[in-house]
């Protein structure tokens, strides 16, 4: 019972305390709200007062700025007015000056008009005087106006020919000096870098034998061995009285090489019969194919050409067994590539294109025995097939001037090809072609009017032209030599340079009486030079020359 009473008392106390606490918290909160509202009102009033003060300050500042701007504007207007007034005064002064100048110009115009009138009157007087002088000249010279014009034109034409010849001489000398200097430097540097020995290829190969008894074994019973070897290789074996040697003959160097390797293997093996010959020929073909691949890779590495198709590399290696006028085509292609690269580097051009075109320029010679067309046409088709660049294809197509070169690199390929082909010992030429070239040279020179005879000398490197002195003057000789050189350049293909030497000779035959008269005139002339010499040394030299001349002249007349 007591517990229940305690609990009830506790609950009642708790309710009372809760009510009292709520009431006190409510009063505290209301007092805080009241204080906050008063503070907010105070802050709002203070802010309103500050805003009003700032508004008044800004208004004052704006009024001051307006006053300052107005003052500045007034000052600027005053300054502009002064400038305008100054410009007006200057304009007025200029107008006055212009008026004065106009008056002066009018005065000058009047003076010029007077002078023009005077000139016109004097001009008419001069024309009348000229007409009278013309009539007097015609009477004195007994020439009409047209005849005088023709005479003057002929004299002018002669002088123009002289001037033309002199201009040609001067321009030729300047062009030769500059061109030869630059070309010699570039080409000399290129040749120096690419100096190489050349050996002329032939159409035969020689295989050494250990003894002459081996010849019979090579021939075989009823010639079966030699027939089998010739049939499989496509070449001819010449077995004659040459001691311990067999000659392999054929125009295809590739087949000759296969036959040579096969025959050497047969000699080393000692067993020579048709089956063994067939086996050795197949091995020789495989060995030659490996050599072709190695040579192609060597050429590519030596020239620094990258990105070539493997088939093109094989064709390049095949050029090892191809010759042109006795020159190995692979060595020639490598040399052209290096020469073109060096010259392109000296001229600041694309060396990659130059070396690539130089290496591929004779690629068609690897297949010209198997395909129709020239080696240039075949080479172009091959390069198009393997998608070479148009610049390289044009350089290959233009290296024999079949088409016009479209780049400077193509011109360099032409030059490098000519340099490699024209060096001494690089190529051989048949007697027929040699004689034909000389005849063509002489025929071109003889085709010009006034040429008496021409002679091609120094293996066609120089041509001497004898002209008729009564038809060709000294000045016309220069023009004639130029025309002959131009025609040779247009109509002939030749490596190197051809010198055109025009000779004009006048001969006078005199008898002894005339010679004595000549002797007297020359003695007077030389003695006159002795007495007119300015220094003692010059007098002595002239006197010695005159005495020597007389002595030689006397000896000549005695003979």
Image: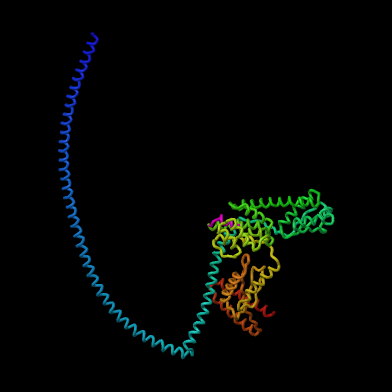
Residue 542 to residue 297: above or below: below
Q: Which stretch is magenta?
A: 349-358
Quadrant (top left, top right, bottom left, bottom right) of the N terminus: top left
- Residue at (47% x, 90% y) in the render: 140
User: Is residue 483 or residue 351 the one in the foreground?
Assistant: 351
User: Is residue 30 or residue 19 the one in the foreground?
Assistant: 19
- In the image, is 475 to the left or to the right of 17? right
The location of residue 310, given as percent across then percent down, is 62, 52
Outermost residue to the top: 2
Quadrant (top left, top right, bottom left, bottom right) of the C terminus: bottom right
* Magenta-drawn stretch, dominant element (helix, strand or loop): helix
Way the structure is coloured: rainbow
Report the number of numbered marks: 0
Outermost residue to the front: 1
The location of residue 28, given as percent across then percent down, is 18, 24
Quarter-of-image position of residue 503 = bottom right
Whether residue 149 is in magenta: the answer is no
Quarter-of-image position of residue 122 = bottom left
The location of residue 59, given as percent across then percent down, is 16, 45
User: Is residue 309 or residue 402 the one in the foreground?
Assistant: 309
- In the image, is 435 to the left or to the right of 18? right
Visible residue check, residue 189: no
Visible residue check, residue 277: yes
Whether residue 352 is in magenta: the answer is yes
- In the image, is 240 to the left or to the right of 17? right
């Amino acid at each position: 019972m007591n517990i229940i009473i305690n609990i009830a008392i506790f609950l009642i106390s708790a309710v009372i305390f809760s009510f009292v606490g709520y009431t006190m918290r409510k009063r505290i909160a209301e007092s805080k709200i009241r204080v906050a509202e008063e503070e907010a009102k105070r802050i709002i009033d203070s802010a309103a007062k500050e805003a009003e003060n700032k508004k008044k300050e800004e208004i004052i500042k704006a009024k001051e700025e307006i006053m300052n701007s107005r003052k500045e504007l007034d000052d600027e207007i005053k300054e502009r007015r002064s400038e305008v007034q100054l410009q007006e005064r200057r304009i007025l002064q200029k107008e006055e000056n212009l008026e004065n100048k106009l008056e002066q110009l009018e005065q000058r115009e009047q003076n010029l008009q007077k002078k023009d009138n005077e000139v016109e009157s004097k001009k008419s007087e001069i024309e009348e005087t000229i007409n009278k002088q013309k009539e007097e000249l015609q009477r004195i010279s007994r020439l009409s106006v047209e005849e005088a014009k023709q005479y003057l034109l002929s004299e002018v034409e002669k002088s123009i020919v002289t001037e033309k010849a002199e201009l040609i001489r001067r321009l030729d000398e300047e062009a030769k000096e500059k061109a030869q200097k630059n070309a010699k430097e570039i080409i000399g540097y290129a040749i120096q870098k690419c100096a190489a020995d050349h050996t002329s290829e032939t159409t035969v190969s020689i295989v050494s034998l250990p003894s002459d008894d081996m010849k019979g074994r090579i021939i075989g019973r009823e010639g079966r061995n030699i027939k089998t070897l010739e049939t499989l290789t496509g070449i001819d074996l010449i077995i004659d009285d040459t001691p311990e040697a067999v000659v392999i003959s054929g125009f295809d160097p590739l087949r000759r090489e296969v036959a040579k390797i096969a025959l050497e293997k047969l000699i080393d093996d000692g067993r020579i019969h048709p089956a063994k010959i067939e086996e050795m020929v197949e091995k020789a073909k495989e060995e030659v194919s490996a050599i072709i691949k190695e040579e192609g890779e060597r050429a590519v590495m030596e020239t620094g050409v990258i990105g070539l198709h493997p088939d093109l590399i094989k064709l390049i290696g095949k050029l090892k067994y191809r010759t042109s006028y006795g020159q190995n085509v692979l060595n020639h292609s490598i040399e052209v590539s290096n020469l073109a690269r060096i010259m392109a580097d000296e001229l600041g051009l694309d060396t990659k294109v130059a070396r690539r075109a130089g290496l591929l320029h004779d690629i068609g010679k690897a297949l010209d025995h198997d395909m129709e067309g020239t080696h240039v046409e075949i080479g172009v088709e091959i390069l198009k097939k393997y998608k070479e660049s148009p610049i390289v294809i044009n350089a290959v197509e233009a290296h024999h001037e079949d088409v016009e070169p479209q780049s400077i690199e193509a011109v360099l390929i032409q030059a490098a090809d000519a340099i490699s082909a024209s060096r001494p010992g690089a190529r051989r030429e048949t007697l027929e072609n040699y004689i034909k070239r000389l005849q063509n040279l002489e025929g071109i020179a003889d085709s010009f009017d006034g040429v008496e005879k021409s002679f091609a000398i120094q293996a066609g490197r120089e041509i001497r032209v004898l002209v008729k002195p009564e038809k060709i003057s000294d000045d016309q000789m220069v023009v004639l030599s130029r025309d002959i050189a131009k025609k040779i350049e247009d109509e002939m293909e030749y490596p190197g340079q051809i010198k055109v030497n025009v000779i004009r000779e006048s001969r006078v035959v005199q008898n002894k009486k005339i010679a004595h008269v000549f002797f007297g005139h020359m003695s007077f002339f030389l003695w006159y030079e002795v007495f007119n010499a300015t220094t003692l040394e010059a007098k002595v030299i002239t006197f010695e020359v005159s005495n020597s001349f007389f002595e030689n002249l006397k000896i000549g007349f005695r003979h």
